[in-house]
Image (spheres, rainbow, N blue to C red):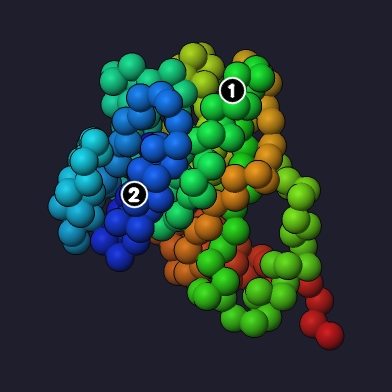
Amino acid sequence: MIPARDESATIARCLSSVTAAAARIDLPVCIVVAADGCLDDTVAIARAFAGVEVVELESSNVGAARAAGSRRALELGADWLANTDADSVVPENWLEVQVALAAEGAAVVVGTVRPDFDDLSERQREAWLDVHIPGHPNGHVHGANLGIRAAEYVAAGGYSSMPEHEDVDLVARLIRHGRSIATDTAEVITSGRTVGRTPGGYARYLREDLLRLVPRT
């Protein structure tokens, strides 16, 4: 499930990566894009991909968009909700890893996210590498790399209509209903842009919070 708002520059690359990941598993996969108030060509680009469902809404609210996309996926019979973002690229083993962990009993899979280093300054790249250790999932919740068992999603009440941090809010409720596993074996690459779709999202983290974690030398 992929929320998108004016992501014509990135949605094709995202959908290409998700399609490639879907081809690696022997299970039916429906890709749902929740296009929220898009004024560009996001919808047309998404609909050009075979097997992609597009849900259009006018909420200007990422929580509502994720809820609408998840609702459509459930209507289509999904028993696992794999989430990413329209400005992200998933690895080919993305769904393989989530399916395997689900088979081991995971109700929630919290995956790692790395910004596209080409979008960062040298100091940002150095700061990110200083605070992220390969092979050690930090457990931070990112909607760009999140898997959820459908039954637990419903039991937890689904995504709330929040303008940001809807993923963190949902996972806090989900862990009361089932086992959560953090992994870095299927890391998602996301945009390193510093102006995002919400004021306090990942773009703000890269622009402000990340550099505060590492003192100037």
The residue positioned 49% from the left and 14% from the top of the image is: 151
Residue 203 vs 215, above or below: the answer is above
Side of 194 where 39 appears, left or right: left
Can residue 163 be seen here? The reply is no
Disc 2 marks a residue whose amino acid type is Leu
Q: Earlier in the sequence, mark 1 or mark 2?
A: 2
Q: Nearer the viewer, residue 94 or 54?
A: 94
Q: Residues within 10 Å of mark 1 (few under 14, many from 20)?
A: many
Q: Nearer the viewer, residue 2 or 215?
A: 2
Query: Split into 4 quadrants, where in the image is the C terminus?
Result: bottom right
Can residue 4 be seen here? The reply is yes
The residue positioned 33% from the left and 17% from the top of the image is: 77
Disc 1 marks a residue whose amino acid type is Ala
Q: Which residue is label 1 attached to?
A: 102
Side of 48 where 213 appears, left or right: right
Residue 83 in the image, given as x and y percentages of width and height: 46, 38
Name the secondary structure under disc 2: helix
The residue positioned 60% from the left and 27% from the top of the image is: 100
Residue 25 vs 205, above or below: the answer is above
Q: Residues within 10 Å of mark 2 (few under 14, many from 20)?
A: many
Residue 195 in the image, given as x and y percentages of width and height: 45, 69
Residue 14 in the image, given as x and y percentages of width and height: 38, 53
Name the secondary structure under disc 1: helix
State if disc 2 and disc 1 touch (CB < 8 Å).
no
The residue positioned 45% from the left and 37% from the top of the image is: 24
Query: Split into 4 quadrants, where in the image is the N terminus?
Result: top left
- Residue that lies at the very extreme toward the bottom in this rendered image: 217
Residue 158 vs 16, above or below: the answer is above
Q: Which residue is label 2 attached to?
A: 15
